[in-house]
Amino acid sequence: MPDTTSTDAIKPDQQLDALDILAENLAPLGSLIDTTSQQEEGVDVFELLNLWWQEDIHSRLLTWLLDPNGSHGIGDYFLANFLLHSTGRAAELSTPGIAEGRISNGNWLGATSQREWYTVVDGGSGWLDILVVNERLQTLCAIENKILSPESGRQLTFYRIALERDYPEFTRHYVFLSPTGMAPQQPEDRSTWTSVSYDAVLDSVELTIAEYQDRLHEDVQALLGQYANTLRRRIVPVPSDIQKRAREIYIANRHAMELAYRNRPDYAAETKQLLMKAVRQQGWLIDLNYTPYFRFRPPEWDDISALQTGSEFSQSNALLRFEFYVDAKSARLQLTLFRGEDESVREHIVGSISQHPELFSGAGMVLETGIMLLHAGDNILRESDFDHWDEPEVQNKIKASVSDFAANQFPAMNEAIVQCLRRYKEQ
């Protein structure tokens, strides 16, 4: 029986109609992408410094925000909102929580927030990530925070036992916080620890920004804005408007989407073919071709014995080659020096190139024992090129990059290389 779900089962005229409908549906998605891109412009400090995934960074920030006496100047506003979110979740799961009437803003101004509460039980020790204690209300909130890792062993049981021992008269609210709100591993912990996702953190941060926008110190406002941005980008798995709309479009146009995907451009392969053709038109010889490189040389290099002393490849004795590095988003011209049998040749080449900073981007380098990149050009491709990939202007631009190099850079670079090797031969 034929597969009627395949795009091959759709007649050609129906395929064209489906693609037309798909194009109409995708048009508004583009405006959503533009809007979101504008919203996400700017520097994400947590991502720039590679801090977004570090559990301790989140715990430090949360401990500060949950502290009513913190330097943020928001009192217990963030704490009250976080407690409302998490105890609402506790009611859904039938786990211990705090009565809503005890969480109103102002009730927690005298609370304390502590990071890494240390405890010992039966000879074992551990550090609970965050402990918030309200002595006046005889109530506490214990938070075990996870970002990329699951709980280890029976740590939630361990902390619960310790808190029951040390705060026997307190109302205890146990929060197991993670990006997705994952459940505790141990069955007994699922009835006591409330699984809370980072939605609660993001919502509390955004409510704080909105409530205190005219009263926050500019540094605090900037930090909270950065943190909310990091949570949306990296931590909170909430589908964006784009993701929701894209999913709707895919479901409604599945056959056309699959047909379009099967016929998508292979940017790297097509770019490489255009560049190789342009290289051959210059009379240069292709030396090696494998993803993501292809290497080439001018014919006159074959008469220079010093350039035949390479030991990098079993199928080639290349010591020095021009090459294009090509992937799905970039194409760059490079000049690479490979390992060789005679280090004095390599040293002479590097020394000579160092005298020509106007020609080689790697000028000034000292000889290294491995492969050396002596020159790296700019990326030939721009993001806008992919929007017009099949238009002649883009193909001509790629081919013209080789012609431009041949006319304006190659003669001087080649002369510098050939002259340096002639001088080496004369030594």
Image (spheres, helix red, strand yellow):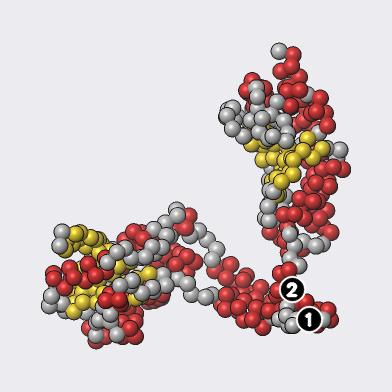
Q: Which of marks 2 and 1 is in front?
A: 1
Q: Kindly check if marks 2 and 1 are in contact, taking CB atoms under 8 A apart as contact.
A: yes
Residue picked out by circle 1: 10
Task: Give the mark count.
Answer: 2
Could you tell me residue 281's position as x and y percent? 87, 43
Image point (79%, 40%), residue name: 286
Residue 192 visible in rendering: yes
Mark number, residue 107: none
Secondary structure type for disc 1: loop
Could you tell me residue 10's position as x and y percent? 78, 81
211 to 231, vertically: above or below: below
**Amino acid type, label 1:** Ile
Displayed quadrant of residue 243? bottom right
242 to 116, vertically: above or below: below
Image point (69%, 40%), residue name: 334
In the foreground, 145 or 63 = 145
In the foreground, 392 or 275 = 275
Residue picked out by circle 2: 259
Q: How crowded is mark 2: few (under 14 residues within 10 Å), some or many (20 or more)?
A: some
**Amino acid type, label 2:** Leu
